[in-house]
Image: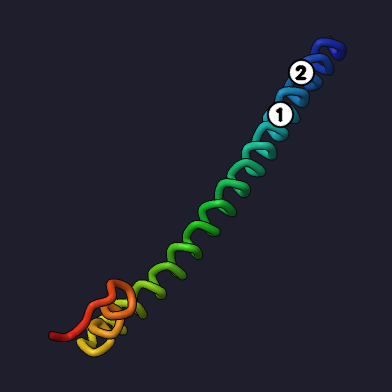
Amino acid sequence: MKRVITAMLIIVLAVLIYDFFQLFNYHGELRKTFSVLERKLNQFKEDNLELRADLEYFSDVRNLEKELRSRFNYKKP
């Protein structure tokens, strides 16, 4: 009877250890995914700041006119 109980305990322990390692690997994958998403978020934040700065710059008619002249060789009549 002791051998049966010992064998069952060993099987349960093996299953628990297997599940633990699966969770550990899954956690590693989630950390990698989180890292990638965090980098993308930071890039989007930087892009957003640049776009806001451009929007503020081009909101001024003088700056917009200056940019049109430089890019498209626009001249006043």
Residue 31 drawn above or below residue 21? below
Task: Tell me what residue is drawn at x 68 percent, y 37 percent.
Answer: 25
Q: Amino acid at mark 1?
A: Leu
Upstream in the sequence, badge 2 or badge 1? 2
In this view, the residue farthest toward the left is: 77
Q: Amino acid at mark 2?
A: Ile
The Cα–Cα distance between marks 2 and 1, rounded to whole angstroms, is 9 Å
Q: Residue 26 location in percent, x, y?
A: 62, 37
Residue labelled with disc 2: 11
Please name whichever residue, 30 or 60, is drawn nearer the observer in this view of the structure. 60
Callout 2–callout 1 Cβ contact below 8 Å: no
Q: Residue 72 location in percent, x, y?
A: 28, 72
Where's the C terminus, which quadrant? bottom left
Q: Secondary structure at mark 1?
A: helix
Residue 9 located left or right of residue 26: right
Disc sitting over residue 16 in the figure: 1
Residue 56 drawn above or below residue 23? below
For residue 9, which quarter of the picture? Answer: top right
Residue 37 located left or right of residue 11: left
Please name whichever residue, 13 or 61, is drawn nearer the observer in this view of the structure. 61
Please name whichever residue, 14 or 10, is drawn nearer the observer in this view of the structure. 14
Residue 19 drawn above or below residue 75? above
Task: Tell me what residue is drawn at x 56 percent, y 51 percent.
Answer: 36
Q: Residues within 10 Å of mark 2 (few under 14, many from 20)?
A: few
